[in-house]
Image (cartoon, coloured by chain):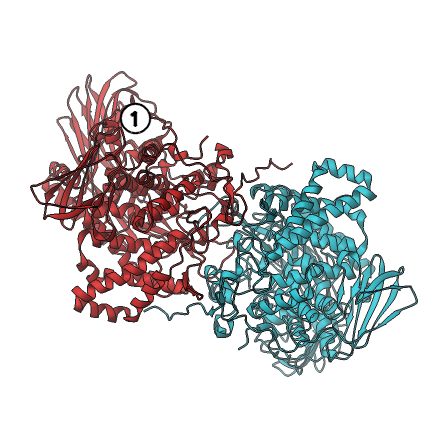
Chain colours: A red, B cyan
Amino acid sequence: MSARNNTEPLAPLDRDRYPADPWRLVDRIYREDNLGLSETLFAVGNGYLGMRGNHAEGRTNHHHGTFINGLHETWQIRHAEQAFGFAETGQTIVNVPDAKVIRLYVDDEPLALDVAELLEFENALDFQDGVLRRSLLWRTPSGKHVRVTSDRMISFEERHLAVMRFDVTVEDADAPVVISSQIINRQDGEDEYGSRRQKAAGFDPRKAETIGERVLQPEQFWQDGDRSTLSYRITQSGMTLAVMADHLIETENDVVKRHSIQPDRAKNVFRVQARAGVPIRLTKVVSYHSSRGVPPHELIDRCERTLDRVTTEGIDVQYAKQRAWFDAFWERSDVRIPHDVQLQQAVRWNIFQLAQATARADGLGVAAKGVTGSGYSGHYFWDTEIYVIPFLTYTNPNFARNAISMREEMLPKARERARQLNESGALFPWRTINGEEASAYYAAGTAQYHINADVTYALAKYVRATGDVDFLARGAVDIAVETARMWATLGFWRRGAQDTFHIHGVTGPDEYTTVVNDNLFTNTMARFNLRYAVESVRAIQREYPQAYRRMVDRLDFQESELLEWEQAADGMAVPYAESLGIHPQDQHFLEREVWDLEATPDDKKPLLLHFHPLVIYRFQVLKQADVVLALFLHGDEFTSAEKRADFDYYDPLTTGDSTLSAVVQSIVAAEIGYRDLALRYFEHSLYVDLADLHANTADGVHVASVGGIWSALVYGFGGMRDFDGLLTFDPRLPEDWPELDFRIAWHGSRLLVRVTQDAIRIEILDGEAIDFSVRGERFVVEPGSPVVVALEGQGPVLTGIPAAPLGTRREDGTFITASVPTLPGTPE
Amino acid sequence: MSARNNTEPLAPLDRDRYPADPWRLVDRIYREDNLGLSETLFAVGNGYLGMRGNHAEGRTNHHHGTFINGLHETWQIRHAEQAFGFAETGQTIVNVPDAKVIRLYVDDEPLALDVAELLEFENALDFQDGVLRRSLLWRTPSGKHVRVTSDRMISFEERHLAVMRFDVTVEDADAPVVISSQIINRQDGEDEYGSRRQKAAGFDPRKAETIGERVLQPEQFWQDGDRSTLSYRITQSGMTLAVMADHLIETENDVVKRHSIQPDRAKNVFRVQARAGVPIRLTKVVSYHSSRGVPPHELIDRCERTLDRVTTEGIDVQYAKQRAWFDAFWERSDVRIPHDVQLQQAVRWNIFQLAQATARADGLGVAAKGVTGSGYSGHYFWDTEIYVIPFLTYTNPNFARNAISMREEMLPKARERARQLNESGALFPWRTINGEEASAYYAAGTAQYHINADVTYALAKYVRATGDVDFLARGAVDIAVETARMWATLGFWRRGAQDTFHIHGVTGPDEYTTVVNDNLFTNTMARFNLRYAVESVRAIQREYPQAYRRMVDRLDFQESELLEWEQAADGMAVPYAESLGIHPQDQHFLEREVWDLEATPDDKKPLLLHFHPLVIYRFQVLKQADVVLALFLHGDEFTSAEKRADFDYYDPLTTGDSTLSAVVQSIVAAEIGYRDLALRYFEHSLYVDLADLHANTADGVHVASVGGIWSALVYGFGGMRDFDGLLTFDPRLPEDWPELDFRIAWHGSRLLVRVTQDAIRIEILDGEAIDFSVRGERFVVEPGSPVVVALEGQGPVLTGIPAAPLGTRREDGTFITASVPTLPGTPE
């Protein structure tokens, strides 16, 4: 098979089961074979609260998950060997009590999807209002026909709110109907089988760490009429949580209510004497509140206020507000591929995931899986800054600002961490929920110092695209300054004919090579970080003198630091191999053996699950190509020829074992002219989750990859760039695509960009005139006067795909040879 | 202060407290301030069973420890992040029930050393019979004078046996005397405070990992007359243990006996109506038996058989046998420095420790702390092979053979581990008790592939010094073959004008630089390993054809492997820097910044306790100089000029934070002529434990350092080498030493070597004539005809000490500059 896992022909979605629809993901067949996938694909969430797409009956499942962003337990890491500065406390997102459960009994027979005879079934997630709707017709064991229509919405207006409606009609007979609405603490009890699963399935570092002890300590729990409340304090972290559900039953049938409560389970049961054809509607309104330590009884008060307000306003109003919210979202964020409804559906599902992951995160981070699963323990990584914030900046800048503010609030802990690592300034944690470094595996964790520059990159992107220097002046400049200080002490000068600044002992985004010297990506990003610190300090000094003086005091800032940063940036070592005409990934990358991916059997992939890190690290083989990522992020610092040479070298060495890989390969392939390859990488990314291409979508949506899809569309095919604060376009529309539309925000204006095979059209949707350039030519677009620029083709055209660099002669006269790591048989 | 921590002027021992004595370590003052040190220095053990030097009363202490080599608990390592092939199971030596306890009450007042008025006190460990003897005169609160004389012996003849005698005489009055002999399971109860202590003191990777759960599950426990028995099964590892104590009370006073037993405590109490001046003697005879899983009742039977035999033979016989054992030991192992009783005492204490750590380990390994403490969790490391087995080979070859056999038995697990690491052959665990890799920190663990060559080095040393090819033929050759196979697949060929064989991604013994390419030590050792595999296979082929055929079948051996190994050895890359004229520690070592040790404050040492590994790894700074170790172990492969240049470069960069460092620096300093420095390093090593120079002797004796002291004497000052199987001498007697004597075994003969300032004298003590050379000239010594060779001085003389290499110009025109890692203040 090809080394390019990410460009293989796709197993197309089964369109009988998942019909194409431009605004919905629809599932027409209930199947048990990959429940985890469905649970993720049909999850709903608003960036604060998330519920996996478990069916309301709450029985067969892969993982019943309900998550609150940032609500976590801590636990003591038990190292085999400890060393100074290793993380000591693990952080794991908590599965909060499950309020999704609504069970139905007809003639005392339970509706259980795995065994029920379903005459009709449709489950659909609507991107236009974020509501998950299910409709089914059940033939009960006694032959009665029961229509069940339900929905589930997590509000984007009220972030603590979830609403569920459950409509039941026994169509052709009278029958006793019982609807049992529940809240179940699964973290500590029923159906929580994480650790068993993990053991049985072998290790997978991409899953959540599980915690053996009881996590949710019950505090107050009570019922009052149709309201049930559970509240907890988390054992080690001390965080608190309350959940309250209110119920409204509407029917002309007779109803008897029962309820019961225990620390881990609340039930509101409705016993209905259903007459044939007479509908029953149960509306369940749920509120979750959480905090770092506010007493649970206060959180219960907050839940009550939320529910009181919502029930007073009326439920229908909530649905209407939700629709309005999404109308506005799509107005800002939609990307259209009008000719292909299948692609369109997939693109919108992905963009919809970005809303679900970020919209109401407010001051919180964006976890690797958003709020759709517990993969990577609910931690925040660099992915947000590099893969998600660009989308937010260009569509919903306020969300971007919130995400960056999260890092600003994290600065005190990042300063402490820098001290532990013996550096000045601040060092952001590689993975964290609460701001403390949670990665104890430094080689692919703490050594990724580039996190610092990634955060600054996101800040710069936001400020440059919005012009919001005020945000810098209010304190965000501290991010740039403190990260620059870290780089200035981390690196060192080598004095000689030409002084050079070196950064040793770091890991780039490619985690298949770790703790190296002068990683190209890191050095390029650090150079950017140092320069942006100078730029942002000077901007404040110029525009906000008072804020500048406050900053000087706050950070004990010395004017001389600017010179130090400029010198370090100018002297930054950028590895380059003359003989091969490429940038080595790090100073010594080319001395490694080349891993022969062609000869590696499929059952040994992904490599990280089958080889000890020491084995992988010894080879030229990439999880994701970080040089190629640098070519994209800092495209103005490399020539076209360099981009081509680097891409040709690295692409064949790239496994794509990281989902962050394909989108970047797509963008750069598009730029340099590998048009087919660009499209194949894009389509792979597009279906990473929808077609479960990495076989772990069950653990949650790959949010960064999803963000990258937007980038692949806008930067890759749309050819947009914004180096130095100028909006530029050099489109690369795929051959078969007649048209691509996208909407972006720029300095307070909003643009509609339409790329076709022979022109690019730019229109102001609202706001002021703006400057831009197309293929080097400058234009101004005024409100009401769209600009159309004719295009001669879609850039260079390269055919085929790059081949592995084997047999190439190097500078020292040796040849690049490849081998597969020994794959010896099993021992006697 | 000087960078050379290991050569600083010593805080001399307090000779009022510890008087010089050529055959005993004596303590004349009971003090509480460093009890842990005393407990280690006065520990007794035979390599199987060890008891720390806690006083019999068993009250104030640092750590009540009784250890059985290899008896361990396992526990699940809780990684913050898991990766393929990481160790999952921790192994920790168990503190077995403490049978040392004998408590004394006079007039119901306890003898408690911390508060007692002691009119006389002496505690002495006798190197001539391995008995710890204590004598004290106690003035009780009521003013009576009580003479207490006790001893403690762990038998070297009966490895399961410990004997204690406790003599009490109330000298000047009648008094009720109670002697309470106990066995206490401290692992799970009283006085076992490991985890609290560890937390309070902050982390220290050199201590034992502690286990939270109950470790010893009680099985049978009973008393029968004066015998008490406890037995246990270890919770996770399933290992089993029994301990039995028998008591004999001898006195002319009236005695009443009482006893009681619980799962964790057995008591035999003797109530004596003591008359003035009438002595009381309690003899306590204890047996410990352990196993991997034999039922405890069977171990109890074994204890009974041991005690029956011993009590039948009589106690005095045991003491006499012990003396005879040690007479023979010293006859084989003594090193004499006749002119200085203080040095002589220290040397003998150290050599005595080697007996205590190894003598009755029999098929078990030798833990880093022997059986004197739980430091490093009781694990076996490479230290034994490189630092201890040379001593054993030259003095007690049978012990060496036993230690190597342990590795042979470990081969099946080492083969499995090689498969996990994707290599052929076998890969020995970096640290282990049960043969499985217990190091989950691969950078300073699994990456130390050199363990494989270290084991082969020890094997080769033993075979070459004894001529015991039969041992190879019986199966030990498998070690050489399987380790060579590992190297052949670990390394790779770089094809060019001259093909070279490279080994990437490994860590040498210097743990301050990890996961590097072409570590000089590793490559040199691997080359040796490959060549010795060829040599040993050919030897068997030649001398034991049948055994050879069995080996071919057993190992699926191909004749072509020999050629492969020879080629890899011949092509082995050995890094050399022309511009500086030195061997870089690894291919890229010289690109690092130099850590300025002179400028590093004392409170930041040792570095490993104050800097994150990533920080340390970024610099030229050494825990121990592994290039220098290679210069010693493979001295025939380097010129004198190379040795001088390398030593001059590395010595100033070496912190000596490892106790393995100073002995090697001493040997090479002596060889190249830094006579003062050699002596200072030697004296440092000599007092590492006696003067607690690394402030952690409380955790146990540094057994490898102790082995290195013998090497420093014999190889360093004695100038002995044995490259290629020829015994050579080129002495380096320190200026102030008139004479140095040592005894060595060589091919079945035993030699007495006497070095003086102007001659070396060699005499056969028993056995055949042997060949040797002195400074290149060949001699033969016949039995009964000592050979005296006149010496012109003691080799080259260099004054001063090497200076840090700062300011040196490198090949690329740059200068070597130094910096201290940033030491920023504490964050706001």
**Residue behind mark 1:** A110
Q: In this view, does A511 lie above or below A145?
A: below
Residue B188 x, y percent position in the rendering: 55, 57
Front-most of residues A412 and A269: A412
Q: Quadrant of residue A292?
A: bottom left
Name the element at disc 1. strand
Q: In which quarter of the image is the C terminus of chain A?
A: top right
Front-most of residues A132 and B648: B648
Give the residue at x 88% y 69%: B787
Residue A615 x, y percent position in the rendering: 53, 45
**Image side of residue A707 versus residue B816, left or right:** left
Pointer 1 indicates a residue of which chain? A
Residue A95 x, y percent position in the rendering: 33, 44
Residue A794 x, y percent position in the rendering: 26, 35
Q: In which quarter of the image is residue B105?
A: bottom right
- Observer able to see residue A60: no
Q: In which quarter of the image is residue A285?
A: top left
Give the residue at x 34% y 65%: A567
> Callout 1 environment at 10 Å: few (<14), some (14 to 19), or many (20+)?
some
Identity of the residue furthest to the right in this view: B784
**Image side of residue B88 versus residue A458, left or right:** right
Identity of the residue furthest to the left in this view: A784
Q: In this view, does A304 lie above or below A549?
A: above
Q: Which amino acid does label 1 sit on?
A: Pro
Front-most of residues A820 and A651: A651
- Observer able to see residue B107: yes
**Image side of residue B150 versus residue A445, left or right:** right
